[in-house]
Amino acid sequence: MNEQTPLTETMTMAAALNSALHLAMDADSKVLLLGEDVADPIGGVLKISKGLSTKYGRDRVRPTPIAESGIIGAAVGLALGGYKPIAEIMFMDFTTVCLDQIVNHAAKLRYMSGGHTAVPLTIRTGVGTRRFGAQHAQNLEAWFMHTPGIKVVVPATAADAKGLLMSCIDDPDPCLFIEHFDLVFTQKDEVPVGEHRVPLGQAAIRRPGDQVTVITYGTQVRTAMAAAQELAEQGISVEVIDLRTLVPLDMDTVLESVEKTRRAVVLHDAHTFCGPGAELAAQITENLWGELLAPVLRLGAGYSPVPFAAGLDFHPTADDVVAAVGQLLGR
Amino acid sequence: MLTTSELQDMYRLMALITATSNRACAEVKAGSLQSAFYPVRGLEGVCAALGVAKQPGDQLVSTYRSLGDALAWGSDLRRVIAEIYGRADGVCGGKGGPMHLHDTSVGYMTSTGIVGSGIPIAVGLGIAAQLDGPNSNGTGRAVVTTFGDGATSIGAFHEGMNMAALWKLPVLFLCQNNQWGEHTPIAEYAGSTDLAGRAASYGMTAVKVDGFDPVATADVLREALERARSDGGPTFVEAMTYRLTGHSGSADYSYMPAEELAAALERDPVPSFRRAMLTSGQISEADLDSIEASVAATVDDAFTFAQASPEVEGHLRYRDVFAEGASLAGMGVRA
Ligand SMILES: Cc1ncc(C[n+]2csc(CCOP(=O)(O)OP(=O)(O)O)c2C)c(N)n1
């Protein structure tokens, strides 16, 4: 009997990420990983780098001191020195202690040197959940969108986690790759076996529809899909766009969709105030002012630190999306 | 031991650095150079020592006060000055400016305007050099990072020093101790002003040297670079100098104690070295004069070149935000 290689395999996002790292390190000896606790036996606090140091050695999979500026600074230097570093910052909240290296150095060196120095650096970072409290659960992506020179990537599916991470590692510029703890272990889907790349800057239409467009990314893709399903049962057709990368931002896909539906909701975990949705709403309004049947609505976290108390509302829910869509349809 | 030709090279470099720094300050004061320029007066001996100690292949990470380092590293003076003017012929095509000189053609990898931030970047270049190992001639490359005394206070310094010692990286940490951090003297910001002593506690070789003595400094730097290239680990060198000007090209320096500055000026690198060479007879007066004359002509030529260099063309505004091919359309930039 002929054994057939399966083209895809069901995997968690964690396994997909681990597979992308193995493939990238295998394909190119210039690819390195550095960060706190990344080496075996632990293989990363979420075990995403499991097995890599055993296979590729501690020169290439380097556990570092607890020194975020040092980690990102060293990764910038490695990139200048001809390597393709992947630096892990355990929680996105800890990017606050290495913002200088990300914002002033990684993102600017190509530009300031007139194109003479590239920084092909991938920063992998995790967004924690509310059970960690306010310093381990922040969605700070808008800060980085506001910094020209760094790409911002947020996968929602395991397949995209693999494909987008491989594209980030290949990319000639710095990429911030954001992994949500909520998704890492619970998101499971069909992931292509072997090398898989999803181009940066291409949104995905997760569900076609023609009455309202919901534009989202990361964990909120699930919320949007659940809401869209519920609305479909009520006879309302919602298109769900997963942005996948926030920089570069695929406004073409967004505008094409909203031109059709003439109503839009932007949805994310990040704060509504000055969040990514503000930029999307503004661009949609500027481009489609005469076409829109209602103002673009934003759904995100309210203006408070992340509350630990589970009883307090924080991130938008499917009910919020259903209500927002109802509002846009005048119901 | 330095050869006569090396001594002459050092003198030429020191004279070039002094003359260029003074000319840039004069242009800033006259209003003909609209640029945040940081003079390097007082560092000439340290920079010249670096110039003779470095070898092709070694890499440099500097700061905003980088004119002397850039010239020591072999960057083209005309293009460095054009960069300070923000013109098309600058080493970074005019988009870096005086705080951000880069010249990868000579291994001058980057400069930072953020105090201390070059230190972890040099650590990364050091890891790269260590991973690459020796070249086909059997020698490794060294990475040098220069910074002021004030930079030893910031966290990035601590993080980078610890990593370099931990991984025994081929990095020379060259502290250009000019005794001032902007308007604050070292004794007012450091519990211990013995910076080399502090560096040693990270577990690396640390040396203090008189930065007003270029020959002694060159010896120390050579040894440190040799150690780095032969996988002997990092070295911290504290080169003791004094800032002979204000902090920036236009800054007032009335707050600097007059006697202290006067004493330091007694050791002004170019005239001191000239006296020493005449006394020892290692370089003749005629040779010293001819070096100075050629330096003056070179500096004039570079400023004339820079002032005549075209402005950067408008269409280059969005080039090099990312590598070619990445769309900026979603970010509001339509090609
Ligand atoms: C992180 C940071 N803080 C403050 C400044 C403002 N600043 C510029 S130069 C300087 C003094 C630095 O002193 P030192 O490291 O001794 O270098 P020097 O200027 O004397 O060469 C300061 C405070 C800065 N550029 N970066």
Image (tube, coloured by chain):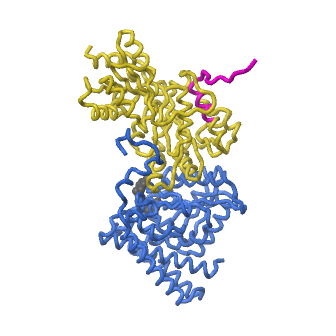
Chain colours: A yellow, B blue
Rendering quarter of residue A302: top left
Q: Where is residue B22 in the image (x, y as percent from the top left)?
A: 40, 74
Q: Is residue A20 magenta?
A: yes
Q: Where is residue B201 in the image (x, y as percent from the top left)?
A: 61, 55
Instruction: Give the residues drawn in magenta, as a range.
Output: A1-21
Residue drawn 49% across the image and 39% down it:
A176
* Vertical placement of residue B312 versus B325, above or below: below
Q: Name the residue nearer the viewer: B242 or A92.
A: A92
Q: Is residue B99 magenta?
A: no
Q: Name the residue nearer the viewer: A51 or A20.
A: A20
Rendering quarter of residue B10: bottom right
Q: Where is residue B186 in the image (x, y as percent from the top left)?
A: 46, 62
Q: Where is residue A95 in the image (x, y as percent from the top left)?
A: 48, 40
Residue drawn 35% across the image and 16% down it:
A322
* Vertical placement of residue A89 versus B305, above or below: above
Q: In which quarter of the image is the N terminus of chain A?
A: top right
Rendering quarter of residue A211: top left
Q: In which quarter of the image is ligand 1?
A: bottom left
Q: Is residue B186 visible?
A: no
* Vertical placement of residue B75 versus A188, above or below: below
